Amino acid sequence: MTSTAITGIGELTTNDEELGALTDAALVIDGDRIAWVGPASRAPAADEQVDVAGRAVLPGWVDSHTHLVFAGDRTAEFAARMDGKPYQAGGIAVTVRATRAASDAELAANLRKHLAEAAAQGTTYVETKTGYGLTVADELRAARIAAEADEVTFLGAHLVPPGEDADRYVDLVCGEMLDAVAPHVGWCDVFCETGAFDADQSRRVLVAAKERGLGLRVHGNQLAPGPGVQLAVELGAASVDHCTYLTESDVDALAGSDTVATLLPACDMSTRQPLPNARALLDAGATVALASNCNPGSSYTSSMAFCVTTAVLQMRMSIDEAVRAATWGGARALRRESGDGAVGILRVGARADVHVLDAPSAAWLAYRPGVPLTHAVWRRGTRVR
Ligand SMILES: [Zn+2]
């Protein structure tokens, strides 16, 4: 295995409690792991050396919420929304039709294209979901294709297929569909929202998934206040995503739990919703993650930097809070923030996912909004940009 020393780091964000943030730092990659982190003056020798000339270095972005197994696009729906038409969950059916009609090779190529696009922007760990199949065969196919991402979530409960009875569809999801898909995924998710699945239906899906040993995630409180957050907390979900409409008791429930509040500001902007109240969550002590929710309907961006910039400039998160939420927070939402091969953190034994900014500090992500600042990226120890 080849080792690489990255030296000349002007500002190093580690997300590690003991290491903290370092200036004039270096780190060493050995194989696919971080082998050393510390002051530049004490860096050990390595096979290769890359001097980043004072640039800022972060863990790679951890995008803990995407929907990348899809075909087609929804430009017309987006344009109509910008003309004032409201967003509705039913738009998902358009992508379901296009996805079912696409070949395996087309879906895999589209996924690969978006993963590469994300990696080029510093995203090194990606969760993606099924949910545009909605039949046993199509969900199983999506789960198999999604295996190219780092984490795969089953989202058979994304939408009741048009024309089908909701309760009968939930029976299918909890039974035959989950049996087929469970061996291929680590997580199960449900869209708990008016127009998608109600609290009882969502609970049935999540309980059935838990019984099969899957981790739980919930899409909740996106379009209106609702039961998603409370359900996620009650069932011990790793994350509840969107959190656009929270009551005080939702915030308290999140603050008193291990469930991460994953905020998806690009989605809120693309659907002309208000931005979530990150400040209330952080001030109450909840763990917050930021993710792209990259999908062709409600949030067609893979840019984690855009999410971070928005969180700082419009959601009153500090730069440190936003960067941490888009790295460590995403890892925590996937329960990958600790142990051997941890992501979203730079310390010995962590996965070597390293993002070098063409900037002297992470503050430039918000200070220079919209400017592409990714200079170099290592994913699992391999330089991908
Ligand atoms: Zn989503």
Image (cartoon, rainbow, N blue to C red):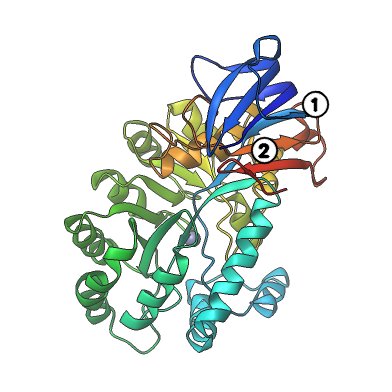
- The reply to whether the residue tagged 2 has its Cβ within 8 angstroms of ligand 1 is no
Q: Amino acid at mark 2?
A: His
**Which residue is located at x 64 percent, y 73 percent?**
85
* Image spot of residue 163 (x, y percent): 36, 90
Residue 189: image x %, image y %? 36, 59
Along the polypeptide, which appears first: circle 1 or circle 2? 2
Q: Label 1 sits on what residue type?
A: Pro
Quadrant in the rendering for residue 139: bottom left
Q: Is residue 152 left or right of residue 301?
A: left
Report the side of 50 relative to 58 (left or right).
Answer: right
Q: Is residue 343 left or right of residue 55?
A: left
Q: Say which of 68 and 89 sits in front.
A: 68
> Label 2: which residue?
355
Element type at mark 1:
loop
- Report which residue position mark 1 lands on: 360
Task: Name the element at disc 2.
Answer: strand
Residue drawn where x is 44% and y is 28% of the image = 284
Q: Is residue 289 above or below residue 64?
A: above
Q: Is residue 186 above or below residue 283?
A: below
